[in-house]
Amino acid sequence: MKRYMFKRFLRSLFSIFMVLTIVFTLIYSVIPRDRVFFSDTNIEKIQKRPDDYANYKYVQWEKLGYLNYDTIQDYCKQLYGSANEQYSNCILPESSETADYVALKEKEGWDVDFFEVSKQAYAVEEVPILRRALNWWANLIEIDYPGKVQTENTELERKVYVGQDFNGRPALMCTGCENKYLVYFDGNFPFIHQNWISINLGTSYPTYSGQGVLEVVTSSQGEKVKKEVMMPNGQVKESSTNFYTCKYKETLDNMDQKNFTDHYADCETLKSDPSMMQISFTMGIISLLLTYVIGLPLGIQMANHKGKWGDKLGQWYIVFMNAIPGLAYIVLVRFIGGKYFGLPSMFPMLGASHPKSYILPIISLTLGSVAGRMMWMRRYMIDQSTMDYVKFARAKGLSENEIFYKHIFRNAIGPIAHGLPAAVILCISGALITEGVYSIPGMGKILPDSISIYNNSMVIGLTFIFTSLSILSTFLGDWLLTLVDPRISLDEKGGSR
């Protein structure tokens, strides 16, 4: 079994790599890269300044991995530093350094050009698609360490040490790392948290600009929440800053200097609503529980009373739910719930903190899923009831209830159990149609939204998440199947023990 699972794991990694490669190819070769500025409001502000416009586009394309970008300013800064006379003379178009810069970049195979107004030189190197994909994989796992911060601040001490956080709890802390807190305790599940090892899925752009993809889907949403905390400078006041997320910030403004005693002042804020992933998972797991609690017993009863009025009524429901488009019955549920029961027809009406916001979306998710569980449970039970072991059990004199629940049910539940881990894990990915209809800020809504506004980093990151979850659910489904049916063995030869 171990060898089988190891080979499955390697094949899964290869599958994920191929999926990501296809996505990279589609995004970076089929979609024009100018489309990434489709929703960027900054573009309109600088279009009348040609140099700023060109520089802004190249900077963003470099961040997104399309190309490598370099300017004469970068070259001269390395030679003479900045803000001095030598630097000012170096960046002039007629300087000898500019001629050397152009010759160097052309020799390296870069495309050299000059800004329209200033006539200063810049160079661009296109990054091949395969190298973009390999760079993405190479930076997938990031480990924080004392040398991570690159700064001109020579006084920055670089060490990892055990200290106390702002609440007086012990924490593993660092100076010179990107994060101030590497391991900490905050009293919330799972109680022990870490910033030492992180998954880098890219940086979102143009929406949620500057935030990591994983940070976008796992961070809280809504309005800022203030609470009384002790600031790093020792003062106690109300703040919405999440100090456990503080990262190194090179330049401190006046407010930073008042509140912080070091450069770890780039922090996230505490907000009122759960994250996208948490909202989707909450609705998904409740809907899943209702689906199994309602759908499996009904499917069993339909099979146990095959051909009777209860079975026929259940089949009518299954046919109706399979025939009607999902969007149609979701809109119908929203209309009935809003008009006749006074429930919020749109999620933002009462917000994520109100239980009523979840009622109609959960009902919409459950109705179709219940029909599917009823149909498959009934089918598996009826298929098993025609097997030879059932006839043998009857010949032994076992009662119909014993045959049905001790034999038929145990064999029929296997395929249902196999799909359970996938159903649980994929709750994280959200429900595309339901979240769209109810305007729910969850995982199911963000993928089509990202595609429509050409947020390529978000599309790639979400593709990785969804693909990995699918692979993981398959592993867990196989493992659970061996627990439900001990006759099944996961080995290279297959078959049963």
Image (tube, rainbow, N blue to C red):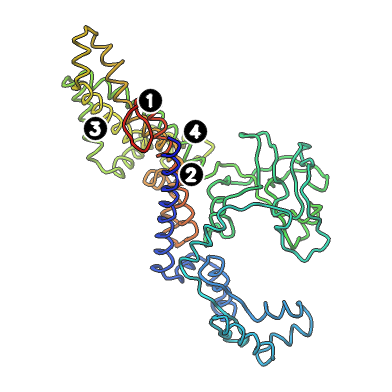
Q: Secondary structure at mark 3?
A: helix
Rendering quarter of residue 53: bottom right
Q: Position of residue 322 (x, y in %)?
A: 24, 38
The numbered mark at residue 318 is 3
- List the residue tagged with mark 1: 484
Label 4: which residue?
A: 355
Q: Is residue 63 left or right of residue 180?
A: left
Q: Earlier in the sequence, mark 3 or mark 4?
A: 3
Q: Earlier in the sequence, mark 1 or mark 3?
A: 3
Secondary element at tag 4: loop
Label 3 to label 2: alpha-carbon separation: 32 Å
Q: Nearer the viewer, mark 1 or mark 4?
A: 1
Q: Residues within 10 Å of mark 4 (few under 14, many from 20)?
A: few
Q: Residue at x 21, y 26 (%)?
A: 383
- Residue furthest toward the top? 397
Marks 1/3: CA distance?
27 Å
* Quadrant into which the C terminus falls: top left
Q: Circles 2 and 4: CB distance less than 8 Å?
A: no
* Circle 2/circle 1 CB separation < 8 Å: no
* Alpha carbon distance from label 3 to label 4: 29 Å
Which of the two discs, 1 and 3, sits closer to the camera? 1
**In this view, the mark in front (3 or 2):** 3
Instruction: Please give the name of the residue rendered at 27% of the width and 25% of the height, measured from the top-left corner.
Output: 299
Residue 375 image position (x, y, % from top left): 25, 30
Q: Is residue 145 toward the left or the right of residue 161 in the image?
A: left
Residue topped by disc 2: 348
The answer to whether 154 appears left or right of 396 in the picture is: right
Mark sitting on residue 337:
none
* Residue depicted at x 60% and y 46%: 223
